[in-house]
């Protein structure tokens, strides 16, 4: 039996922003409800793409005989022949109406892997995986015929493939803006934190019940970045009038606690003015990492005790606060599940030329490699996943700090598991049991590079 995939609940790859925007060709437009998809090798998938246009009759032409495109009213039905080879197959379906064109990008897994593997819709916000790898939460934004967007929140069970639609969160910002991403969630999806424009500011349960993010007296604007596996510990930041802009905070069973933070910059004189953010934590929440948000210098807390490792090992280059040292930015998945290792980069802040760095929170030591790059996450067995170059990431890597060597992610997966995932993918989260990999995919197109999320269940 063929598996019919409707785009409203499909796990689809977004490869170009252009398919979600109208062309300025007079008053005409041609839009697709999806602009990319990864097919399984067997040829049993059927993808339905809604075509929205006022430019007259439309056509859909594949560039490969392996792809079939048929019209069904306002939808295009896309299928692919079985891929019996050991190679990743890619192709394009070009939609035309009047003088307008859109491209749908498709690819297909090789026969050697028939497990759970999916690409997700392009989104302006984050997609989050629970620590145990069971759930992935995401939000789709579908352009409607009246030029407005429909927002829907979804929860994928990576063990069964089941997709559940979540209750719609309330609008943010006077009803004008909706939440565009999910920042983090607990292992049982009992707690889900939504983000709007990069700020993780709203939480609810899997049943749609709002969950209050409390702040201490004198503070406001909480932002939750990550949580422990059971959802009992949350970490992030709050804001304080008249003080540093950001103050690190953790919540234990919903009650906020301000974490210790550096009050003076690395020059030993200037008070911190942007403040400090907590970004991520271990599975049990006992080890937390983050950065001082003026210099981006790395720091971490063990049982609430601050270790200012970025300051301890950094150096001020000049009077303009150019700081060389251990840096981290906005990743909330850079720590190993047990909290022992946290990944970052060593160099001049967010500038190019930084090298991958790994911190051992038990010993306070750090290690570096000698090429451009950064560490994205660490698996439960100590496998280190990174990327290079560190600015404008383009290549996923598996790093060996002991031998100062690296291997491309796609080569490592093929060697270890016999899986061919193609190029342009990076891992930034590994499940606690190591069986699920989750991360980014980079694709090139007419509008430049675009980013989408993907995951693979290896066992």
Image (cartoon, helix red, strand yellow):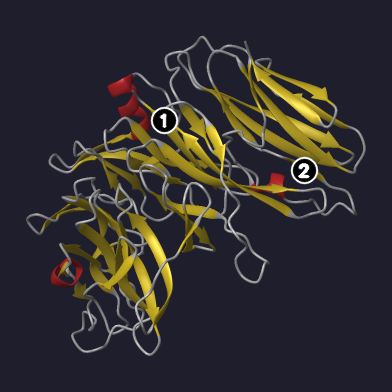
Residue at left offset 63%, top offset 32%:
105
Residue 296 visible: no
- 354 displayed left or right of 220: left
**Residue 422 image point, x, y percent:** 45, 29
Q: Horizontal and vertical percent for residue 346?
A: 24, 60
Can you identify the residue that label 2 sits on? Answer: 31
Regarding residue 429, the answer to whether it shows in the image is: yes
Mark 1, other Cα within 10 Å: few <14 / some 14–19 / many ≥20: some
Q: Nearer the viewer, residue 170 or 318?
A: 170
Q: Nearer the viewer, mark 2 or mark 1?
A: 1
User: Which quadrant of the rendered structure holds the C terminus?
Assistant: top left
Q: Which residue is mark 1?
A: 456
**Quarter of the view holding residue 301:** bottom left
Q: Residue at x 63, y 44 (%)?
A: 16
Q: Quadrant of residue 317?
A: bottom left
Quadrant where the image shows the N terminus: top right
Camera-side residue: 87 or 308? 308
Q: Residue at x 49, y 36 (%)?
A: 156
Closer to the chain start, of discs 2 and 1, is: 2
Judged from the image, the secondary structure of the residue bearing numbered disc 2 is: strand
Indicate whether 428 appears above or below 363: above
Q: Which mark is residue 62?
A: none
In this rendering, is residue 124 above or below 407? below
Position above or below: 9 against 212: above
Residue furthest toward the left? 363
Other residues around mark 2 within 10 Å, as few (<14) / some (14–19) / many (≥20) = many
Q: CA distance from mark 2 to mark 1?
A: 29 Å
* 54 left or right, relative to 361: right
Q: Residue at x 57, y 34 (%)?
A: 11
Q: Is residue 244 left or right of residue 399?
A: right
Mark 1: which secondary structure? strand
Q: Position of residue 111 (x, y in %)?
A: 47, 13
């Amino acid at each position: 039996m063929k598996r019919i995939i409707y785009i409203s609940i499909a796990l689809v790859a977004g490869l170009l922003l252009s398919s979600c925007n109208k062309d300025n060709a007079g008053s005409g437009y041609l839009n697709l409800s999806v602009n990319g998809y990864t097919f399984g090798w067997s040829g049993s998938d059927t993808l339905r793409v809604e075509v929205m246009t006022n430019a007259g009759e439309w056509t859909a032409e594949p560039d490969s005989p392996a792809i079939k495109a048929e019209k069904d009213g306002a939808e295009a039905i896309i299928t692919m022949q079985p891929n019996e080879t050991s190679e990743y197959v890619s192709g394009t379906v070009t939609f035309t109406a009047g003088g307008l064109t859109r491209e749908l990008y498709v690819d297909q897994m090789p026969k050697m892997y028939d497990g759970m593997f999916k690409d997700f819709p392009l989104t302006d916000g984050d997609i989050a995986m629970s620590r145990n790898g069971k759930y992935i939460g995401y939000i789709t934004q579908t352009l409607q015929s009246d030029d407005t967007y429909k927002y829907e929140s979804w929860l994928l069970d990576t063990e069964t493939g089941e997709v559940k639609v979540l209750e719609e969160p309330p609008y943010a910002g006077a009803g004008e803006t909706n939440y565009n991403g999910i920042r983090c969630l607990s292992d049982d999806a009992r707690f889900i934190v939504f983000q709007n424009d990069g700020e993780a500011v709203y939480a609810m349960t899997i049943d749609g019940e709002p969950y209050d993010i409390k702040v201490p007296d004198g503070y406001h604007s909480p932002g939750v970045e990550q949580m422990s596996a059971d959802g009992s510990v949350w970490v992030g930041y709050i804001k304080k009038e008249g003080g540093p802009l950001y103050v690190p905070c953790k919540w234990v069973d919903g009650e906020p606690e301000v974490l210790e933070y550096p009050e003076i910059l690395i020059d030993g004189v200037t008070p911190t003015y942007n403040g400090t953010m907590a970004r991520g934590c271990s599975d049990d929440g006992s080890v937390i990492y983050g950065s001082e948000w003026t210099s981006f210098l790395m720091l971490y807390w063990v049982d609430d005790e601050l270790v200012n490792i970025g300051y301890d090992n950094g150096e001020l280059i000049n009077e303009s606060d150019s700081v060389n040292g251990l840096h981290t930015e906005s990743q909330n998945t850079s720590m190993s599940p047990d909290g022992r290792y946290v990944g970052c980069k060593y160099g001049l802040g967010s500038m190019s030329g930084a090298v991958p760095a790994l911190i051992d929170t038990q010993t306070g030591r750090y290690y570096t490699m000698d090429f451009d790059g950064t560490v994205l996450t660490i698996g439960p067995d100590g496998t280190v996943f990174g990327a290079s170059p560190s600015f404008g990431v383009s290549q996923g890597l598996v790093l060996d700090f002991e031998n100062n060597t690296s291997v491309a992610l796609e080569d490592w997966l093929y060697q270890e598991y016999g899986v061919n995932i193609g190029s342009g993918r990076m891992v930034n989260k590994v499940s606690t049991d190591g069986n699920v990999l989750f991360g980014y995919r980079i694709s090139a197109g007419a509008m430049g590079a675009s980013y989408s999320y993907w995951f693979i269940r290896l066992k």
